Image (cartoon, coloured by chain):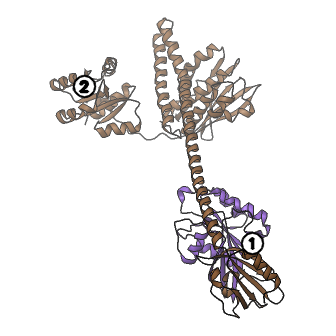
Chain colours: A purple, B brown
Amino acid sequence: MKKAKKVCLIGRFAVGKTSLVKQFISQQFGEKYKTTVGVSISTKKIQIDDIELSMVIWDIAGFEQDGHYTHYLRGVHGIIWVLDGTEPESFEILDIVSKSMPETKDVPSIYFINKCDLLDEWVVEESAVNDLKKEDHIVLKCSAKTGENVEIGFNKLAQLMVN
Amino acid sequence: MIPKKVKSFLLKQKEGNGCYCIAINDKHLIIQCFGNPGLVGVSAPTFNMPIFEFLPILVTETFEEDFEIPFYNVNDDYVCNIYFLKLPKVSYLILVDRSEIFQVTQKYQQFAHDDNISKNKFKRLAEELDKAKHSLKKSNQEKATLIAMLSHELGTPLTSIIGYSELLIKGGSNIKSGLETIHRNALYLQHMIENTLMFGKTESGGVQTNLESTSVAVLFSDIFVTLLPAVQKKKLKLIIDKSCKDFINIDVTLCKQVLINLINNAIKYTEEGSVELKYSLVKKHYVFSVIDTGLGVAKDLQEQIFSPWERIEENSESGTGIGLFISRKLAHSMGGDIKLKYSSKEFGSIFQLILPVKDLPVVETFDRKALINNISEKSLLVIDDDYDILILIEAMLATSELKVHTAVNFTEAQTLLENEEIDLVLTDYNLGSVKASSFLETIKNKYDLPVLLMSALPSNCDKNNYLTLGFDDVITKPLSVENLLNIILTHIQR
């Protein structure tokens, strides 16, 4: 059986959304930061039991522009919240989006706390990570650079969307 | 034919931009196209092709209502807005080229983000600098407190030393007992300086403890004699039971320091009545209780009194907390603690020092008498530019049969080394402008003698440095007969 699901990455600018997609799709990482404007689409097929799932990944521009994301989140099946372990302010996006689009709370989602390779710059307190975990969210510290937990995270979301 | 609604929409959106319009039926198959697909960066579709095969971004769309997808990145060169207009039977997808505005937006946004990232980095750096500044400030504060502690702690033995020495000068006291008190307090002072310096050297207050066996009676008698002048001055009653014959294994110096601090505080805050020191053994713990009939400690200050940082400012009774702070640190270093067991305005306070019962370490003993007999024909050369020290060492070693030569500089020392049979050299490090390290090699190579160094309270790091230079051992000043003789005996035998 074939299924197609729309997955959106939500996060502040420069948290590494595009890099995470690139790592997941082609296991590559670019050091240079290039800001995304609008939306780029990538597709990856994942086999889950007898289902061939086509993940249509919407890499959306950073969420610093008020409300611009409403066009993109329409009909979303899964959300990847991307946070930056070296940037505590990146967590603010969770409140902003859940207030303006409360319906996102009911969408299957996972939380990536990216840049876990930058140990010296990691400033996010463990308590903030645990707070997310307390709400039964799937929270993964990951690195778009090394690939740590990236595929695992996408696959977990795929499972959630299929179930 | 394009319906009117679509036409007017196209006219509105186009505004000089490239535009491509695709008509799809209710099964989402492409049935008609209008315009040049190259203008929006796509190739021409084949008819009856499902729309999501042509534009994969639409694969999850339900096409049930109008929608808009702004700034869809078609490829590296083209960006377009996608509009879907739902009409009966035939619907329309309109792709409007936004590459130009995208380039400008991208450039502007890239600049803004790069700027923001730099600002955040600077912000973080500034925060780190601020943290470093605060830590420096705290460290300075701690240093100041250490100095304050030192002054505070030195006060008690100094009072006894000054008091008894004045009495002796005036001939108002028994010479032997007066000198014994002065000597005991001077030793106490020395240990306190060593321990207080340790606080400065270690963040954790890692004070070295030296477990020894003593009787409660001896400990209490010492404390009684030390504190008697202070109690008499305030006309208080000092109740210390000196009859307890129990032997306890404690660090006598540290324990005494803590108990004296506790009793001193009690004396300070008791205007009339008594201060009592009690001992008991409770569940494998030595419990020393200091009971006073003083002012008591207000409830909101009962935890604060053990912390010097806050209390100094808030407590009008200046100085009390410093002693308690250092005392608690010392208690911790002995594996114990200090507690304020009880306090009230009516009845005063009970502070307790609680120490765990410990076994004494097994120490190798050596036959000192036999060793002393063996050194009767040995001779020692002492080099120090301070005549008082030379005289003191000669006096200290007078009871041993060791022959002592003295020199105030290396020239004198060299004459003695040439003309006398010397077995061991003991030298100060700073001899005027000359350092002992400068002639160490000469003594070692020419005379092949062990060289011991005297140094005032060296740190472990200093000691290691001296040993690396080639000195055979380091003797800590102030000197005691016991230590001096032990080290000399050890090295002279080799």
Quarter of the view holding residue B44? bottom right
Instruction: Give the number of the mark in front: 2 or 1.
Output: 1
Numbered disc 1: what chain? A
For residue B445, above or below residue A9: above
Q: Is residue B398 visible?
A: no
| Image x and y of residue B120, in percent | 60, 53
Residue B387 is left or right of residue B283, and the answer is left
Depth check: give the residue in front, A52 or A23. Answer: A23
Numbered disc 2: what chain? B
Considering every residue shown, the one lying at the far front of the view is: B16
Position of the C terminus of chain A, as image quadrant, is bottom right
Q: Secondary structure at mark 2?
A: strand
For residue A11, above or below residue B479: below
For residue B216, above or below residue B57: above
Residue at image mark 1: A71
Residue B40 is left or right of residue B63, and the answer is left
Considering every residue shown, the one lying at the far right of the view is: B88
Q: Is residue B372 visible?
A: yes
- Amino acid type, mark 2: Leu
Quarter of the view holding residue B430? top left
Q: Secondary structure at mark 1?
A: helix
Position of the N terminus of chain A, as image quadrant, is bottom right
- What crowding class fits label 2: few (fewer than 14 Cα within 10 Å), some (14-19), or many (20 or more)? many
- Amino acid type, mark 1: His
Depth check: give the residue in front, B390 or B254. Answer: B390
